[in-house]
Structure formats: structure tokens, C-alpha cells
Image (cartoon, rainbow, N blue to C red):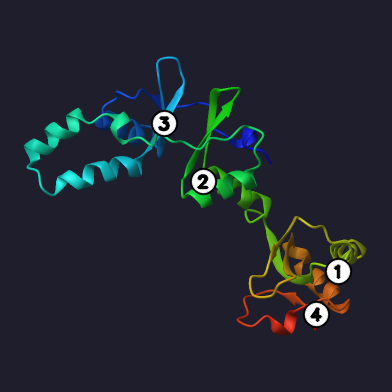
Amino acid sequence: MYVGRVMHTDLVTVSPDTPVAEARDILINKGIDHLLVVDGKGRLKGIISDRDIRQSWASPAISLSVHELNYLLSRLTVDMVMVKKTISISPDTTIERAALLMQENRIRALPVMEGGALVGIVTTTDVMGVLLSAIGIDQNSRRFVVLIDRDRIGVAAEITNVLKVHQVNIMSLFAWPDADHPGVYHLVMRVPSADGDRAIAALTDEGFKVLTEYVPDIEPYLPFR
């Protein structure tokens, strides 16, 4: 999946000289967390979030009177608070890459640029939605895990073939490495709920060790044993 498929193109933007109080009201009224800041020619100048606004208001709130605080906030503009060094991506960036950039830089949104023009924005909510959909968590399914040896060529094909023989459809499948056991991957599968017991029994009969719930010690389920 690519960012261009899920990005928001109905952009809500403000200019750098927009009062922060006005930016806050826009965020609230639109039900969004970020505003893209553009100049008169539509060029991206920065990004401002609800968190940036809260932080900008928090520091003077302690020492100033209400009158002084209101005066200060009325003069505070977006360009004084926004993040100017933005990290942007292109529409052909993969969702996985976007998620990694957000995690590494501890940010919650990425402007999307194409040919120097601002064309969209993607947020952590968008990325999470795609990932949850990809693993089928929103479907009526049964989840189980088979621990596999990364270096065993064809093991995934063996597992899927067992399910094929028993006429069990795979709704989703993905793998992630085990942090404590190098070379071991968790092959996470979802099948229709009605076929769950049959799928687990078929794989167990073929010698695969299937995890259907959390266990504190996975040693007995390692593929090397």
C-alpha cells in the first residue's frame, strides 16, 4: 500500500501570520490534529499541531495574569509556534516507510509533496488503520501463530499448502521477528472463525507447533526443537 492511496487531499491550511488562537479554533471545529502552513503561493512553510499550541500556551500561563495572558496570546501567530523543518514524503512512499519515519522522528503527521507541490497529508491514524486492515483484525476471523525458522526455505509454502489441502482460506498473513530468538519469526495468520479449529488441528498433525494464546515462554514452540 502506498501513501497516495490513503492520504488526505482535502487540505486544511493556514498562513504563517494566522493567530494561534484562530488555528486552535480551526483544529477544534474541523476535528483534526494538524494544520499545514503555506504562504500566499501555496508553498509549504511548516506544520502546527494541537500539541504545539498547547505547549506554546502552557509556559506563560503560570506567571502571567489573565489579562496579560490574553494579550500575549492575541499577538502569538502560527509562524512563532509551527515546526519549520518538516519531514515530507511523496505519494509513492510505502505505508511501512511512512510509519517508520513517524516512529523514528516521533511525529504524528507527514506532509505529502509531489513535484514540489503540496498534495496531501498522512497521519498516524491513517497508517494504523491500513495496518490493522491488512492484518484482518476488523474481520470475523480466528488468529493463531506458527513460529518458523527464517532460514528454512519454503516453510511458508508448506504451511499454506496444508491449509489448502484442508480447504481453509487464509484471510491475512504476516510475519515479524522474535526479539529474543534470532532467526525465529512469528507467522501470524487469520482464517475464517468457522475454520479455525480445523486449521489448527491440520497444522498440528503435520508437526507444526501452533500458538493460539499468549505464553510467557515460547521455548517449547521454537522451530529448532
Tell me the element at label 1: loop
Front-lying residue, 147 or 80: 80
C-alpha distance separating marks 1 and 3: 48 Å
Label located before the other in sequence (2 or 3) = 3
Name which quarter of the figure residue 182 lies in: bottom right
Left or right side of 77 for 100:
right
Picture layout, residue 51 above or below residue 35: below
What's the mark number on residue 124? 2
Image quadrant in which the C terminus is located:
bottom right
Instruction: Please give the name of the residue rendered at 88% of the width and 65% of the height, measured from the top-left corner.
Output: 153
To which residue does mark 4 refer?
224
Does residue 25 appear in this view?
no
- Residue reaching furthest to the front: 85
Locate the N terminus and report the quarter of the image it occupies: top right
Spatial separation of the CA atoms under disc 2 and disc 1 = 35 Å
The residue identified by callout 3 is: 46
Is 41 left or right of 26, judged from the image as shown? right
Sort mark 4 into few (<14), some (14-19) or many (20+) by Cα contacts within 10 Å.
few
What residue would you read off at disc 1? 152
